[in-house]
Amino acid sequence: MGKNRKLLLVIVFVLFGLTTGIISANEKAQTVASQQESKKFSVLTIENFIALAATNDTVFESILIDELALKYKKDLKLPAKDLVFSVKNEYDMFLSKDKEDPSSTVSLSKLFPNTGTSLTAGYQSTPSFTSTTNSSEFTFTISQPIAENAFGKSTRLYDQILGIEIDVAKHQIIEAYEDYMATIIGVYYDWYEAYTNLMIGQSSYQENLKLLENTKEREKSKIALPIDVNKVNIQVLAKKEKLSNLTGAYDKALNIMVTAIRYEGSEPLIPQEPFIYSGKEIEFSSEYNDFVENSRTYQVLRLLEDKSSFEVDKNANELLPSINLLVGYEVNGDDFGIKNEDNMVYAGISMDWPIGEQIERAEYETSKVTLSKTRLTKKNAHFQLQTDLKNLHRQIIREKEIIGIIDQKIELAEAVLADETENYSFGKVTLNDFIQAVNVLDDNRFSEIQHSVEKRKLIVEWLRLTDQLIRKDSIVREDSR
């Protein structure tokens, strides 16, 4: 795709239904420099991450580009409104009469699809076997269907069907965009979780190294036994193994994140805790009622039912015979200038009625079955969505409860570890008790970040399912300004 044709995506508004407000998708990414362990890092917030991903990730572009073809769908499917001009010229040679003359035919026709009216004007001049002059005529005809496609009814129904298909396609494009947006947000959450776990793992490993050195000193002072050193060594190796696994998980999450924003910088990036969903409170009844009344999902379900209903009406109309009222004017005469003309005005009717209409009848009956199925699908979707949202809401509540419990456990584990540290220094508890206190705190810290991220992911899923993750569906492209 050439530079002048390249689509540059700019999200006009992406509303996430958060308490923090509006995230502008074309916001410039800004990073905050910080120092950590003598290395320079750049903090990438989730807001800036989303902005970069929406701007740079070609997956977003591939989703949105489908909308460009929709504006041509009606022109491709509906009867053409073109003014058709036809010309035919030939040279006739009468072998038996040693005669040759030109023959010409010119016509101009126009169809008005919304009314079904067809206008045709034509001129024809042809040589005659029995006359030395050409026979010429001018005709003008108006044709109006009054049964099948009466006054353009079938075409208007098809226009409504196509309009619904276009609306559904637009909604589906937004849904696909929203689904991928949820995936992108999940990428940041995974990166943040992996980073936080890595920090916990590094801290735990360093603390256990200190414990090992302390235990070795105690052994030298005959306070600790060699078995104590071995126990701590095993603990250190376990923490080292855990740290290696956490490093691998972080590298994987980092690579996915970098790909999403197409980052090519040399400065390492680190995440910041994403607070935008942590304070989101869900009021099930009001949000569910709003979802049923106003969401894209229910709009699509209603549109699909309307489409099936229009299909039945259209197929029923096509069972009628093709009957056309004809009104016309005709002039006949000699030579190209229509000399010695005869004028005639006529009115009539034409009919084309296939007996049996096997295909049309089958299409009509099939469309009625499809309508019934669409209505059942809509009802089933309603109950399934209601069940899914109820279960999702309960999951969110449960995660909040679990996080509250884990926070209490961490507070208690920290207090226990502080006491056990003091007790172990005075020989009041065994090394096993002290190691257990260390591991209990670590396990709860890992569990807290896991459930914290899971809660945020569930809230994103709630917003996605209820069509709140993206509120604004206006997408501005550089080449459409």
Image (tube, rainbow, N blue to C red):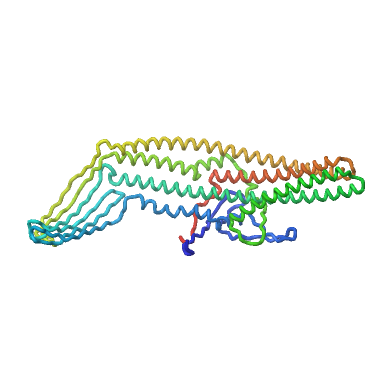
Q: Residue at x 32, y 47 (%)?
A: 155
Left or right of residue 417: residue 126:
left
Visible residue check, residue 248 = yes
Who is closer to the viewer here, 233 or 403? 233
Who is closer to the viewer here, 358 or 456? 358
Instruction: Give the total number of marks visible in the rendering.
Output: 0
Q: Residue at x 88, y 45 (%)?
A: 425
Location of residue 334 with respect to 469 vertically, above or below: below
Location of residue 317 with respect to 60 vertically, above or below: above
Left or right of residue 316: residue 285:
right
Q: Residue at x 45, y 35 (%)?
A: 376
Q: Quadrant of residue 122?
A: bottom left
Q: Residue at x 27, y 35 (%)?
A: 356
Left or right of residue 169: residue 400:
right
Who is closer to the viewer here, 21 or 101? 101
Visible residue check, residue 481 = no
The percent position of residue 311, horizontal first and vertical second, equals 37, 41
The percent position of residue 466, horizontal first and vertical second, equals 54, 44
Left or right of residue 234: residue 459:
left
- Of all residues, the one furthest to the right in this rendering is 222
- Of all residues, the one furthest to the front in this rendering is 95
- Of all residues, the one furthest to the bottom in this rendering is 4
Location of residue 275 with respect to 125 vertically, above or below: above
The percent position of residue 456, horizontal first and vertical second, equals 63, 46
The percent position of residue 94, horizontal first and vertical second, equals 11, 58
